[in-house]
Amino acid sequence: MVVTFKVTGGEQGEWAVLQVSGELDLVTSPMLRQRVHDVVAEGYHCLVLDLSEVFFCDSSGVGVLIAARRLIRSCQGRLRLVLPARGAADGSHVNRVLGALGVRRLFDVYGDVEAALGDEGEPLSA
């Protein structure tokens, strides 16, 4: 079985949205890191990372998420992660990894892209 890693993107108002799918690991995390840097270089300082299709994330993937947070914060921007509602309730893989490493609280996590893009939505609790 060949696992395909993809990062697709788009813009919605002031927000850049990157949909990530596949495994976020040592091999693929540099691709996500580059895409985040490209988005910031294009002038977007508000970023939604949709991780609802990521089914595996190792420490290098977590490192990219933390680095993305640091980069966005250095631009006085906002970073929001999307983990599916079912993942928020019973623990998606990424959610479990972030929680196990004690870094889940660093991120604003939403159940879907629409909630992440809305100003009235509150992030899901850690």
Image: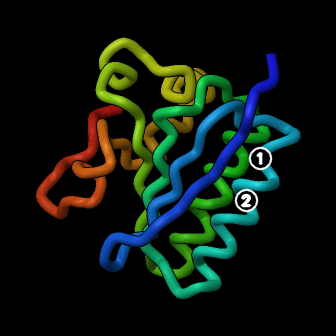
**Rendering coords of residue 11 (x, y %):** 41, 71
The quadrant holding residue 31 is: bottom right
The residue nearer to you, when weighing 95 against 38, is 38
Name the residue located 58 percent from the left edge and 32 percent from the top edge: 54
**Rendering coords of residue 73 (x, y %):** 51, 71
The numbered mark at residue 43 is none
Residue ID for mark 1: 29
- For the C terminus, the image quarter is top left
Q: Amino acid at mark 2?
A: Arg
Residue ID for mark 2: 33
Count of labels shown?
Answer: 2
Q: Is residue 78 above or below residue 120?
A: below
Q: Is residue 23 above or below residue 80?
A: above
Q: Determine the secondary structure under disc 2.
A: helix
* Side of 32 relative to 116 (left or right): right
Farthest residue toward the front? 1
Q: Amino acid at mark 1?
A: Ser
Name the residue located 43 percent from the left edge and 58 percent from the top edge: 48
The residue nearer to you, when weighing 74 against 60, is 60
Q: Are dots 2 and 1 in contact, CB under 8 Å?
A: yes
Name the residue located 17 percent from the left edge and 51 percent from the top edge: 121
